Image (cartoon, rainbow, N blue to C red):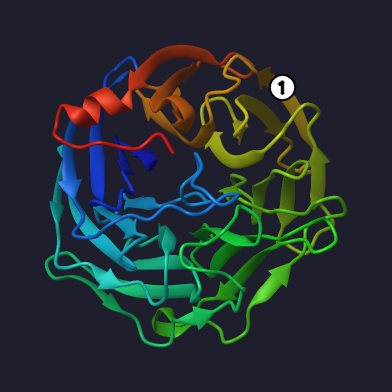
Amino acid sequence: MSFNANAALTGITNEDSGNYVLAADVGPDGQVNLREAYATGGVGLHGINGGTTGPDGLFGQGCVAVSNVTNMLAAVNPGSGTVSLFSINPSDPSNLTLIGEPVGSGGQWPTSVTFNKAGDTVCTLNGGEINGVSCFAVNQTSGLSPLADTTRYLGINQTTPAAGPTNTVSQILFSSDSSKLLVAYSGTTSTAPGYLGYYDIGLNGTLSKNFSAIAPAAGGALPFSITPITGQDAYVVADPALGFEIFDLTGADRSSAVAISGQGATCWSTYSPNTGSYFLIDAQGRIFEVAIDAATLQSTVVGNYTQFLGDGLIDSDVMSVNGNDYMFTLAAGITTLEVFALPGPGRLQSVQQFNISAAVESVGITVSEW
């Protein structure tokens, strides 16, 4: 399961028996309550980690994306090789309606999706044997349709499902101005590092033929998540090899690779607007809070929260509720959702441990621990 926090809390079950979007209401205190499960019309499929499945089923971030402009939600169906589109009731954001039929993702094992700024285009990242990106026009009554000249192949040597987490693509994201389509690829080792790459977006949403791949700064190896640095053409990218990287796409010499003492597998990242902090999530059960200077892009770790060791923390997102920020983090190892209040920098507070297994069983669905 992975999710998106945006007005309501939504995520996919990613089960091979049938994929569902889970929609949960978020109360004024940040606590969640599952409202409904919506069938996507496709099935899930977990990646392979060391010969078996693991807590991170998709080796990435962004399996669900939301547009607040068009009130639409897109979700991947990794086992079907498709993408589903839902409309969101703006006055009741946990109320979703499937629009049209799922469409082929343009490859195999789609794992991440993103909307452009206008909300009229969705692009997906495929991580299987046929890997790369494809984009689709959004029609609010008929659903998704492929956009011409947007399927691009990355040529990574992989299987369906992917074996990882190294040598996998991990997230797709439009740049803030929708001029670029970004892709994070985790390399294999420090001697064969991954990259943050992008396609330029042209007229009618077409993608450039050439792909620009930017290597991490010295010390970086396995770029994983992509979180924009507010007000900058720059990005925080979690890297389980050392901590995180900052990629500066402006051409200025502000990129860096930052080691975090005590980290074991920092793979996911998110941003809290009210605190101004960036959060790095470690699969071994740690959360690191980072402050970044907007002018220099220099970073400082301002919080280190280690009380969740063994819980298998993975995908995270932040939502503002009544002027307060809350962070929602999946604890895949114990099938719960951890809810944290973020009242200020360095002040992460646990407010709820939501039992996902019990909640989905109440609506007739099961989710696996791994």
Determine which quarter of the picture holds residue 282: top right
Q: Residue at x 33, y 73 (%)?
A: 136
Quadrant in the picture for residue 339:
top left
Residue 20 in the image, given as x and y percentages of width and height: 23, 47
Q: Position of residue 332 (x, y in %)?
A: 45, 32
Q: Quadrant of the C terminus?
A: top left
Q: Amino acid at mark 1?
A: Val
Q: Residue at x 30, y 65 (%)?
A: 80
User: Of residues 146 and 19, which is closer to you in this image?
Assistant: 19
Q: Is residue 297 left or right of residue 35?
A: right
Which quarter of the figure has residue 77?
bottom left
Q: Is residue 90 visible?
A: no
Which residue extends farthest front? 51
- Work out which quarter of the rendered image holds the N terminus and state it: top left
- Name the secondary structure under disc 1: strand
Residue 322, how many percent across, how many down?
34, 21
Please give the count of numbered marks on the rendered protein.
Answer: 1
Q: Residue at x 17, y 46 (%)?
A: 38
- Asked if 335 appears above or below 130 in the picture, the reply is above
In the picture, measured across the screen, residue 316 lies left or right of residue 87, that is: right
Residue at figure coordinates x 57%, y 41% from the top left: 268
In the foreground, 42 or 100: 42
Position in image of residue 314 (x %, y %):
52, 36
User: Is residue 32 positioned above or below 24 on the image?
Assistant: above
> Does residue 79 show up?
yes
Q: Within 10 angstroms of label 1, few (less than 14), some, or many (20 or more) residues?
A: some
Give the residue number, with chain letter if any, for mark 1.
302
Looking at the image, residue 368 sits to the left or right of residue 198; the answer is left
